Image: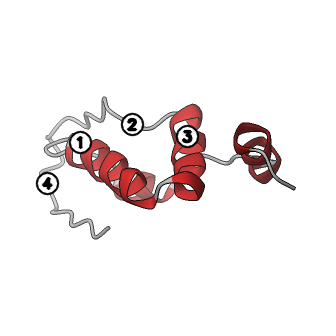
Amino acid sequence: MFSCYQPISNDEPIVAKKELRDDDWLDLLRLAYTGRKKTFKHYSDSYLSTNGQTYWSHTSQLTAYLPNYALKIRELIGGE
C-alpha cells in the first residue's frame, strides 16, 4: 500500500471517522495466513473507504498493538 497525504489549512477540521479496530487488524492477520488475495482486497477496500478524511500527520503511524497476536492467530486457525 502506498498512501499519499497533502497539507491542509490549519483551519481545516481533523475528521477521521473510519479506522480499523484491534479486532479488524487481528482478522487481517488471520486472513494473511488463510487467504492472501482476500486479505489484500479487504485491507485495500477498507483503506480506500477512508479517502477524504483528514488526519494529523503522525497518526498514520499509530496502528494497533496486538500483544500475543501469534497465539491468537494459532487459536483461530489451528497450528503450533
Image coords of residue 10 (percent x, y): 18, 48
| Label 4 close to label 3 by CB (< 8 Å) | no
Quick one: label 4 or label 3, which is nearer the N terminus? Answer: 4
The mark that comes first in sequence, 2 or 1, is: 2
Helix, strand or loop at mark 1: loop
**First of labels 4, 1 by sequence position:** 4
Q: Indicate which label's residue lies in the foreground, 4 or 3.
A: 3
How packed mark 2 is, by other alpha carbons closer than 10 Å (few <14, some 14-19, many 20 or more), is: few
The residue carrying mark 4 is: 8
The amino acid beneath tag 3 is Asp
Name the outermost residue toward the right: 80
Q: Are marks 2 and 1 in contact (CB under 8 Å)?
A: yes
Question: What's the CA distance linking mark 1 and mark 3?
Answer: 19 Å
Q: Quadrant of the C terminus?
A: bottom right
Residue name at image x 45 percent, y 60 percent: 36
Distance from Cα at disc 4 to Cα at disc 3: 33 Å
Residue 27, numbered circle = 3
Q: Which residue is mark 2?
A: 19
Dot 1, how many residues are within 10 Å of its Cα: few (below 14), some (14-19), or many (20+)?
few
